[in-house]
Image: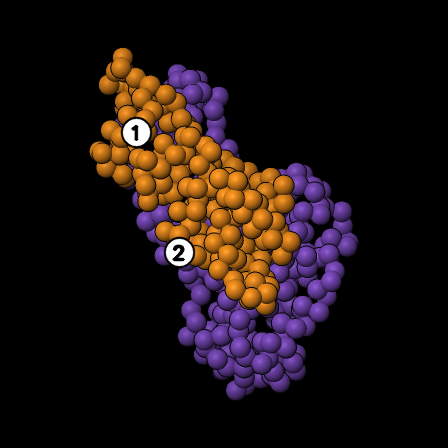
C-alpha cells in the first residue's frame, strides 16, 4: 500500500509513460514492462484523487485504501488482457486523457461496489448522506479551486511562511495555526489561548491572516492549478478507441449513480 | 435553492480561490455589479476596488476586517488586515476604504457564496448571447458540463439572474 501511495504522488511524465506503453506493446505481457507501465501511469490516479475525489476520498479512510489497491489491480488486469493489445493506441498526446478517463471509471466502479457490499457510515464522509456521497460534486460548481490545506504543496507552505508579517510570539502563533491547518488536526483554540494568553477573537484574526497569506500565494501560482485538466477536456478526446471506451461507461446514463457525475 | 446546496466539506481545512469564467471577466464584472446592486456594501466595495473587487473578495472573502476609528492606536492598526490590503491593493485603496467604512467592522461575502453568484452571472452572460434554439440547447449542455450541474439548474440560474436584472 505504501508503495502505491508513494507512486501516485509522483509527477506524471507523458513521454516516459508513452515510451513504456510502446515497449509493452512490442513485448506483450512482459512482467517487467507491465511494472514500468503501472509505475509511470499511477501518478494520473493521484491527480484524480487529489482533484475530483478529494472531498470524499481522503488519505487514511477505508475507501481511499480500497481505491488505491483496487484500481491499480484492475489496471494490472487490463494490461494482461487481450483487450489492451487489440485496442490500445499509442498517442502521447491523448495518453493522459485515456488514463484519466479509465482511472475515473475504475474509481467510480469501486465506489459502486463498496456501496453495494457495505453500509457506509455517513459520519465518515463529513455527515453528508450516502446519496450526496455518490452525487460527488454535483452540488458544487467547478469554477472554484478547492484545496485542502493538507494537500498544499511544500513550496506553498514555505512561501506562506515568508508572507507572515509578525515576529516573536505572534509569528509562533501563526506558524502553529498553519501547521495545524496542514496537518488537518483542527486549530487548537483552547491550547493557543492558554499558552499565549490571547482571546478567541485574536486567534480568529491570526487564522484569517494565515488564510489570507495562503490565498495570496495560491493566486500567485494560479497557472499551477490551471494545468489540472477539466473533465470536459478529457471527454473531448477524438480517438476512436477512446470514444468507444467512453460510450461503454456512459451506457448506464439513466441510472442514479451517474447523475451529477457527468 | 437549486444548485446552492450546503458546503460539503470542513471549511477550516479548505482554502478556495475562484476558477475561470466562460465569458470574459469584464463582461461578468459589469453584470455582477448590476445584479448585486441592492447590496449597498458591495457597491461601496466596488467604488473602492472597481475591477479588483473580485480579487479582493477572493483573498479577503469571509474575513472579519476592522477599520479602526478616530481613537485607534498603533496596536489596533498592527492587528488589523490593513497592512495586507495596502500591500496588495495600494495605499489609495486603504484610504478609500477608510472613507467608506471608517470605524466599522465589515465581512466581505465568502468565496463560496461568490462562486455561486459568479456562476449564475456567467451562465446568464453566456446564454444571453444564444441566437437560436439549438444554440441555446448546446450552450446549456456545455455549461452544465462545465459547472457540473444539471441542465435544469443552468436554466434556473439563467432565469433567476434575468428576473433580478429585469426588476431593476
Distance (Cα) linking label 1 and label 2? 27 Å
**According to the image, label 1 marks what residue?**
B97
Q: Colour of chain A?
A: purple
| Residue B24 disc label | 2
- Residue under the image location 39 percent in, 16 percent down: A197
> B18 left or right of A114?
left
> Which residue is the extreme one toward the top?
B71
| Residue B57 disc label | none
Which of A214 and B118 lies nearest the eye of the viewer?
B118
- Residue under the image location 52 percent in, 44 percent down: B166
Q: Element under label 1?
A: helix
Which of B96 and A153 lies nearest the eye of the viewer?
B96
Res A82 visible: yes
> A201 left or right of B48?
right
Res A195 visible: no
> A203 left or right of A242?
left
Q: How is the image coloured?
A: by chain
Circle 2 Cα neighbour tier, 10 Å, few/some/many (<14 / 14–19 / ≥20): few
Q: Is residue A114 above or below residue B72?
A: below
Q: Are marks 1 and 2 on the same chain?
A: yes
Q: Is residue A69 above or below residue A244?
A: above
Which of A141 and B47 lies nearest the eye of the viewer?
B47
Q: Element under label 2?
A: loop
Across and down, in percent, residue B109 comes to 45, 35
Across and down, in percent, residue A244 comes to 63, 77
Q: Colour of chain B?
A: orange
Amino acid at each position: 500500500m505504501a508503495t502505491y501511495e508513494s507512486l501516485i504522488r509522483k509527477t506524471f511524465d507523458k513521454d516516459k509513460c508513452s515510451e513504456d506503453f510502446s515497449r509493452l506493446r512490442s513485448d506483450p505481457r512482459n512482467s517487467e514492462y507491465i511494472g514500468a507501465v503501472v509505475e509511470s501511469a499511477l501518478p494520473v490516479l493521484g491527480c484524480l484523487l487529489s482533484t475530483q475525489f478529494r472531498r470524499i476520498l481522503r488519505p487514511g479512510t477505508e475507501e481511499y485504501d480500497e481505491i488505491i489497491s483496487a484500481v491499480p489491480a484492475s489496471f494490472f488486469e487490463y494490461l494482461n488482457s487481450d483487450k489492451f493489445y487489440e485496442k490500445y493506441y499509442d498517442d502521447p498526446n491523448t495518453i493522459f486523457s485515456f488514463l484519466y478517463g479509465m482511472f475515473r471509471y475504475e474509481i467510480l466502479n469501486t465506489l459502486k461496489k463498496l456501496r453495494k457490499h457495505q453500509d457506509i457510515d455517513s459520519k465518515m464522509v463529513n455527515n453528508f448522506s450516502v446519496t450526496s456521497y455518490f452525487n460527488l460534486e454535483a452540488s458544487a460548481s467547478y469554477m472554484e479551486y478547492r484545496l485542502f490545506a493538507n494537500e498544499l504543496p511544500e513550496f506553498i507552505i514555505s512561501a506562506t511562511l515568508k508572507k507572515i508579517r509578525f515576529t516573536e510570539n505572534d509569528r509562533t502563533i501563526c506558524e502553529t495555526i498553519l501547521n495545524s491547518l496542514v496537518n488537518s488536526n483542527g486549530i487548537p483554540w483552547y491550547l493557543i489561548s492558554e499558552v499565549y494568553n490571547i482571546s478567541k477573537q485574536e486567534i480568529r484574526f491570526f487564522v484569517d491572516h494565515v488564510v489570507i497569506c495562503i490565498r495570496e500565494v495560491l493566486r500567485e501560482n494560479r497557472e499551477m492549478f490551471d494545468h489540472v485538466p477539466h473533465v470536459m477536456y478529457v471527454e473531448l478526446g477524438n480517438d476512436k478507441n477512446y470514444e468507444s471506451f467512453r460510450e461503454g461507461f456512459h451506457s448506464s446514463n439513466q441510472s442514479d449513480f451517474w447523475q451529477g457525475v457527468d | 435553492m437549486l444548485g446552492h446546496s450546503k458546503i460539503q466539506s470542513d471549511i477550516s481545512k479548505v482554502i478556495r480561490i475562484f476558477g475561470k469564467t466562460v465569458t470574459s471577466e469584464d463582461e461578468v464584472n459589469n453584470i455582477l455589479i448590476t445584479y448585486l446592486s441592492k447590496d449597498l456594501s458591495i457597491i461601496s466595495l466596488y467604488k473602492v476596488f472597481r475591477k479588483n473587487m473580485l480579487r479582493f473578495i477572493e483573498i479577503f472573502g469571509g474575513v472579519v476586517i476592522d477599520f479602526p476609528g478616530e481613537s485607534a492606536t498603533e496596536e489596533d492598526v498592527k492587528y488589523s488586515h490593513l497592512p495586507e490590503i495596502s500591500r496588495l491593493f495600494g495605499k489609495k485603496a486603504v484610504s478609500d476604504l477608510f472613507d467608506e467604512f471608517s470605524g466599522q467592522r465589515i465581512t466581505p461575502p465568502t468565496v463560496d457564496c461568490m462562486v455561486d453568484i459568479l456562476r449564475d452571472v456567467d451562465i446568464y452572460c453566456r446564454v444571453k448571447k444564444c441566437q437560436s434554439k439549438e444554440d441555446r440547447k448546446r450552450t446549456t449542455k456545455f455549461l452544465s458540463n462545465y459547472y457540473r450541474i444539471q441542465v435544469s439548474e443552468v436554466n434556473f440560474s439563467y432565469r433567476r439572474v434575468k428576473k433580478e436584472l429585469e426588476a431593476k
